[in-house]
Amino acid sequence: MAEFSQNRSKRRDGEVLGGAVDFLLANARLVLGVGGAAVLGIATLAVKRLIDRATTPRDEDDAKGDAPCLEDSWQDLSLLKATPRLQPRPPPAALSQPVPPPAPSLSAPEGSADAGPQTSPQLSSPAPPLCLTFQEKLLAFERDHVTVPGAHVSLAKQLAGDIALELQAYLRNKFPDLPFGALVPGGPLYEGLQVGTADPVRLLVPLALEPGLWSLVAGSDTVAQDPRCWAVRRTQLEFRPRGSSPWDRFLVGGYLSSRVLLELLRKALIASVNWPAIGSLLGCLIRPRVASDELLLEVQHECLELTVAVLLAVAGAQDGDLLLAWPLEGLAGNLWLQDWYPAEAARLRALDEQDAGTRRRLLLLLCAVCHSHSALWRLGRDRLAQVVLHLGEQEADWAEEALGEHFLQALELLLSSLEQASLPSHFNRDVNLLDGLRKRLMTWALHCTVAYRPPRGCSRGRMQLGNRHHCF
């Protein structure tokens, strides 16, 4: 009976101790979290077993299993490995003193000292970021994203020349009565001013007008009063009546209509020309761009992509001047647009040759940056070239070291022009090159110029082309 009561009291003590352990573990889970509670539980269980072994009288069964139970208890205790403590931060006054070596880890094996020196892997520290100037970033952007490989230039010229020959043969077969001149490819690609696929190759289709039957009238003297344009008027009707010239069927009100000629050539390029056969012959894919108001051909080669702009042209008032059939709106729809590109390219080349300047490189950078922008691409190469010409005429240092400064000056001039909605032509001060942009477009371009940030390519990474379709 006494033994039964003794066992019962031990069971009651165990229940009390178990309840205390459960309470301790519950509070530890709240304070220490799950991991801390688990460690504390293992330690408490091991201590409880030791206490039970010490207070319980030993019998034969316990004596037999004493050694393994104690061993299990100490194994439970061994789970609590000593974690190395962080060394306290030395006070500021002791920063110059030598730092003592860290204490060896308590969990390190005893035989590690005999294993010989171990070479710890040395972590390669990252190189410190380079602080590049804006000039250096601009030159890196020019090298990576502006310069066109020579092999691509040669291939693009070959494709443009072959397309010109094929199109010329088609026009002569399709319209044998219309005296078209020789189709001549040209443009920035042939002037060293090409910026990727942003600038199309200009494929001029000259009209051979009879001398003495046609005269030019300035656009400011017409009903349209547009100084950008010219009218081509039919003359000598009393001596050479209407129908004497093959171009008379394109007359509107006594003037040669650029709009009628554009529609004729557009229908031919879209519906009549067998572009798949020509493309397979040249080893590329050629498709006319139907949605554009301009006459554009998209050329896809395995090495590059190219855009060809087919331009109907007549000779201008002065030698070397060209008048283009351009999709104009309103009263100027039948007029011919003055082409400033040949004069711009020649003037920039002459200025750079005088002082070994970088005006043409500045134009390339401006074109690359604006073409990649979702709003500034609408400014076009012609307006950017005029900005560079206005700056280029100034007597300044145009060496490579000043390229970054001139780039910022060009942006400032472009910003002021958009604010005033005025950009006079370098060759005709009466022509405002921003008249062709609607007020809403100029406002958005001004906003984008004010909030301009250099493209990713100017700092780090690759410049990405913006989505143009969602801006206007």
Image (cartoon, grey):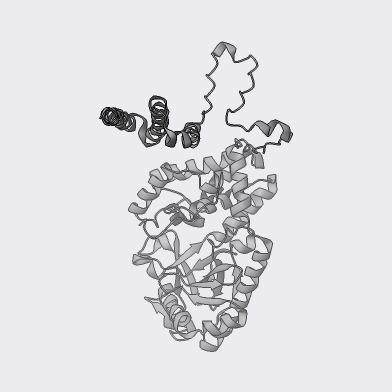
Q: Can residue 90 be seen in this view?
A: yes
Residue 139 position by quadrant: top right
Say whether residue 463 is left or right of residue 266: right
User: Quick check: 331 above or below 438?
Assistant: below
Q: Can residue 207 be seen in this view?
A: no
- Determine the residue positioned at 64% across, 49% down: 351
- Determine the residue positioned at 68% across, 33% down: 111
**What residue occupies the far front of the structure in this picture?**
1
Identify which residue, 430 or 78, lies in the foreground. Answer: 78
Q: How many marks?
A: 0
- Determine the residue positioned at 35% across, 48% down: 443
Identify which residue, 103 or 293, lies in the foreground. Answer: 103
Residue 413 percent location from the top left of the image: 48, 42
Task: State which quarter of the image contains the C terminus.
Answer: bottom left
Say whether residue 377 is left or right of residue 438: right
Residue 327 percent location from the top left of the image: 41, 68
Task: State which quarter of the image contains the N terminus.
Answer: top left
Identify which residue, 454 or 180, lies in the foreground. Answer: 454
Residue 332 position by quadrant: bottom left
- Determine the residue positioned at 53% across, 50% down: 366
User: Quick check: 459 above or below 263?
Assistant: above
Say whether residue 352 is left or right of residue 339: right
Say whether residue 95 is left or right of residue 46: right
Residue 21 percent location from the top left of the image: 32, 30
Residue 63 percent location from the top left of the image: 46, 33
